[in-house]
């Protein structure tokens, strides 16, 4: 047994971990403190395991959003939601709506994309990404609907022109 396996060694590792987390919010710090103390005391239970797995899925989904793998991000969010349905924070839900909207734009479902971007904008009204994507989806929806009209008009024009 080495020094890091003893309760004192675990406590010092946990203190190092906590010192490195200074940029977290007060709520997150208290949660991490509580979880670190449980690990240090050897009370690593199913709840702790689920907490860690939940966070792995959440943070991996953030990574998938960053590299534009939205399907994978949504799948990780679904897995996290199965573990703890009410534990998702505002940023996670924002990323979920943003990912869904982008996927809808890829399939040219612009009105649905606009709805998802609107929901994301409500989560973080100051964030311009969802707002800009919403505008783009509205413009694309409008031009997409007009493209059919112009095709119909040109076909009608050809028919009228040919009858003259």
Image: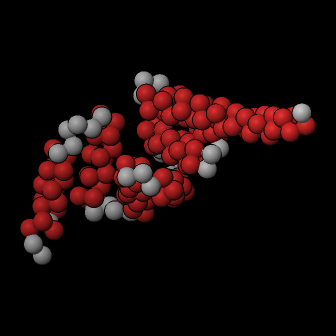
Side of 82 where 58 appears, left or right: left
Whether residue 139 is situated above or below residue 35 in the rendered picture: above
Residue 100 shows in the view: no
| Residue 25 found in image quarter | top left
Side of 50 where 163 appears, left or right: right
Residue drawn at the location 23% of the way across and 37% of the way down: 23
Residue drawn at the location 31% of the way across and 51% of the way down: 35
Q: Percent position (x, y) of residue 157?
A: 81, 34
Side of 59 where 2 appears, left or right: left
Q: Percent position (x, y) of residue 135?
A: 54, 29
Whether residue 147 is situated above or below residue 13 in the rendered picture: above
Whether residue 31 is situated above or below residue 73 in the rendered picture: above
Residue nearer the viewer, 52 or 6? 52
Quadrant that contains the N terminus: bottom left
Residue drawn at the location 32% of the way across and 40% of the way down: 28
Q: Percent position (x, y) of residue 90?
A: 46, 36
Residue nearer the viewer, 55 or 37? 55
Quadrant that contains the C terminus: top right
Q: Residue furthest right?
A: 163
Residue 37 shows in the view: yes
């Amino acid at each position: 047994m080495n020094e890091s396996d003893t309760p004192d060694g675990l406590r010092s590792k946990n203190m190092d971990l906590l010192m490195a987390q200074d940029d977290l919010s007060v709520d997150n710090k208290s949660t991490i403190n509580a979880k670190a103390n449980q690990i240090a005391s050897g009370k690593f239970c199913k709840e702790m395991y689920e907490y860690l797995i939940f966070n792995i899925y959440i943070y991996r989904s953030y990574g998938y959003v960053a590299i534009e793998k939205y399907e994978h991000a949504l799948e990780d969010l679904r897995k996290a939601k199965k573990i703890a349905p009410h534990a998702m924070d505002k940023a996670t839900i924002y990323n979920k709506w943003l990912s869904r909207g982008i996927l809808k734009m890829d399939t040219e479902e612009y009105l649905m994309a606009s709805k998802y971007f609107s929901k994301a904008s409500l989560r973080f009204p100051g964030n311009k990404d969802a707002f800009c994507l919403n505008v783009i989806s509205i413009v694309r929806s409008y031009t997409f609907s007009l493209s059919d009209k112009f095709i119909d008009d040109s076909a009608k024009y050809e028919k009228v022109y040919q009858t003259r």
